[in-house]
Amino acid sequence: MKSVYNYIISIFKAVYSLAQGFEITFKEFFTKKITEQYPENRKTTLVTFDRFRGELVMPHDENNEHACTACGICMMNCPNGTIKVVSKMVEAEDGGKPKKVLDKYYYDLGKCTFCNLCVLNCPSKAIHFQNTFENSVFTRSKLQETLNKEGSKMREKNKE
């Protein structure tokens, strides 16, 4: 007799739980829907949050100079090999010891997990994430970028 009683109680609990789910469903069914007319409104009303991480960029100034020292800390902290820093040694102009400079800064957006470890650990604050979100392409090769511009060089310390 006790098992029949427990069975009936469990049926009522299940019906009550189902009624709660339907209550939430019907509330959402009758609320006013908001549809964004994308991509027509992306310049006027579409807002992305400041903390959104969309694409890694290396800013250059008007003289085509960047702040990257080619230390490779971003590459070491990247958990899945998204970043590859290629550096070269250049003879100093004053005849001093050779200097390490950035040759190529490769970034693969398709592999990136947007963990922000590269940006947080960069000692020279040479890279940051931009708010761009339209990154869909048909081939993965288009997601591989070279962040330093052609002919760019490192910004001098006294200019900062």
Image (cartoon, rainbow, N blue to C red):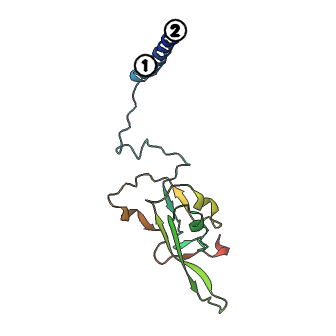
Residue 146, percent from left and from top:
45, 70
Which amino acid type corresponds to the residue marked 1 in the rendered image? Phe
Q: Image height check: is 85 above or below 10?
A: below
Q: Image height check: is 97 above or below 4?
A: below
Residue 46, percent from left and from top:
44, 43
Q: For mark 2, does the 10 Å Cα neighbourhood hold few (<14), some (14 to 19), or many (20 or more) residues? A: few
Residue 63, percent from left and from top:
53, 74
Q: Nearer the viewer, residue 45 or 154?
A: 154
Which amino acid type corresponds to the residue marked 2 in the rendered image? Tyr
Q: Which mark is on residue 5?
A: 2
Q: Nearer the viewer, residue 3 or 12?
A: 3
State the SS at label 1.
helix
C-alpha span from label 1 to label 2: 26 Å
Q: In the rendered view of the protein, which quadrant contains the C terminus?
A: bottom right
Instruction: Please name the residue shown 57% across and 79% down the image.
Output: 101
Q: Image height check: is 140 above or below 26?
A: below
Instruction: Please name the residue shown 38% across and 43% down the image.
Output: 41
Residue 68, percent from left and from top:
58, 71
Left or right: 92 with respect to 112? Answer: right
Residue topped by disc 1:
22
